[in-house]
């Protein structure tokens, strides 16, 4: 079982719709969770971080964390074609270091 | 503010050749990392450095060595390149438990 799991997609949504991206993790002691966006041929870019249960909103993005279910999600409202990218979920484990474990990413395609 | 700078951006090596990938950050971050990214495999940690003077192996360290030259610089060396090391390499840095800032990546092909 991979430590951080994501559906590889592609997830296809129409422009203006809500895109929902999901991630599960295996280390129950994990404390820090991140979402990165990666355009094709580019490096990952941090878009959201979340550390406590519940929702965290930033513009059109909402991160949701449920530690009991070991589940993190990212909602993108009013999806735009420019949101088409691979979204990587990353989790900081319960160890002392700051290293992150990444999922393999979900490819999002927003159709105009 | 440059962030994380990686060089070179592209490289083609012949099997058995050696090379060093350079990485420097100007954000005064303590921790630095080297990842490789392969299709279907995601980002896999090669080595990391929690602070100046320390380095530790990650998930896929075989065939690589690293040097944390100072707080700013963290280099990755391939002593004898193999086709299996064809990949995109990313350097990243972070402060405490915050997320990473990534460099722009190095596309390495070993023929």
Image (cartoon, helix red, strand yellow):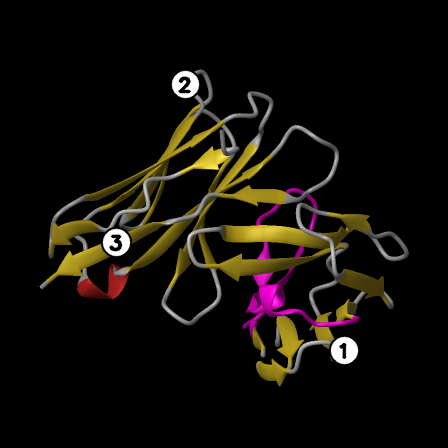
* Crowd around label 1: few <14 · some 14–19 · many ≥20 (10 Å): few
Q: In the picture provided, is A23 more to the left or to the right than A77?
A: right
Residue A27: horizontal and vertical position, in percent?
Answer: 57, 25
Label 2, secondary structure: give it.
Answer: loop
Label 3, secondary structure: give it.
Answer: strand
- Of the 4 image quadrants, the one containing the C terminus of chain A is bottom left
Q: In the picture provided, is B105 more to the left or to the right than A76?
A: right
Marks 3 and 1 share the same chain: no
Marks 1 and 2 share the same chain: no
Marks 3 and 2 share the same chain: yes
Q: Between residues A35 and A48, which one lies in front from this camera angle? A: A35
Q: Residue at x 35, y 56 (%)?
A: A86
> Spatial distance from mark 3 to mark 2, Cα to Cα?
24 Å
* Crowd around label 2: few <14 · some 14–19 · many ≥20 (10 Å): few
Sequence order check, earlier mark of 3 and 2: 2
Q: Residue at x 75, y 33 (%)?
A: A96
> Spatial distance from mark 3 to mark 1, Cα to Cα?
37 Å
* Residue at mark 1: chain: B
Report the residue marked by disc 1. B18
Mark 3 in CB contact with mark 2 (< 8 angstroms): no
Report the residue marked by disc 2. A69
Q: In the picture provided, is B68 more to the left or to the right than A34?
A: right
Q: Between residues B94 and B35, which one lies in front from this camera angle? A: B35
In the drawing, what numbered circle is on residue A108? 3
């Amino acid at each position: 079982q991979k430590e951080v799991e994501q559906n590889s997609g592609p997830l296809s949504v129409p422009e203006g719709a809500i895109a929902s991206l999901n991630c599960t993790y295996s280390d129950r002691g994990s404390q820090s969770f991140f979402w990165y966006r990666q355009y094709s041929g580019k490096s990952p870019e941090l878009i959201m971080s979340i550390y406590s249960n519940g929702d965290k909103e930033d513009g059109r993005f909402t991160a949701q964390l449920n530690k009991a279910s070991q589940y993190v999600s990212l909602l993108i409202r009013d999806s735009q074609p420019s949101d088409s990218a691979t979204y990587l979920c990353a989790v900081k484990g319960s160890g002392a270091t700051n290293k992150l474990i990444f999922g393999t990413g979900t490819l999002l395609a927003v159709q105009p | 503010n440059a962030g994380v700078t990686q060089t070179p951006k592209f490289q083609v090596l012949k099997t058995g050749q050696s090379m060093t990938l350079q990485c420097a950050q100007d954000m005064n971050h303590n921790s630095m990392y080297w990842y490789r990214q392969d299709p279907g495999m995601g980002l896999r940690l090669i080595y990391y450095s929690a602070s100046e003077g320390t380095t530790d192996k990650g998930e896929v360290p075989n065939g690589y060595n690293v040097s944390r030259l100072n707080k700013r610089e963290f280099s990755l060396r391939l002593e004898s390149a193999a086709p299996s090391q064809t990949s995109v390499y990313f350097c990243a840095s972070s402060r405490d438990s915050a997320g990473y800032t990534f460099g722009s990546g190095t596309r390495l092909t070993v023929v």
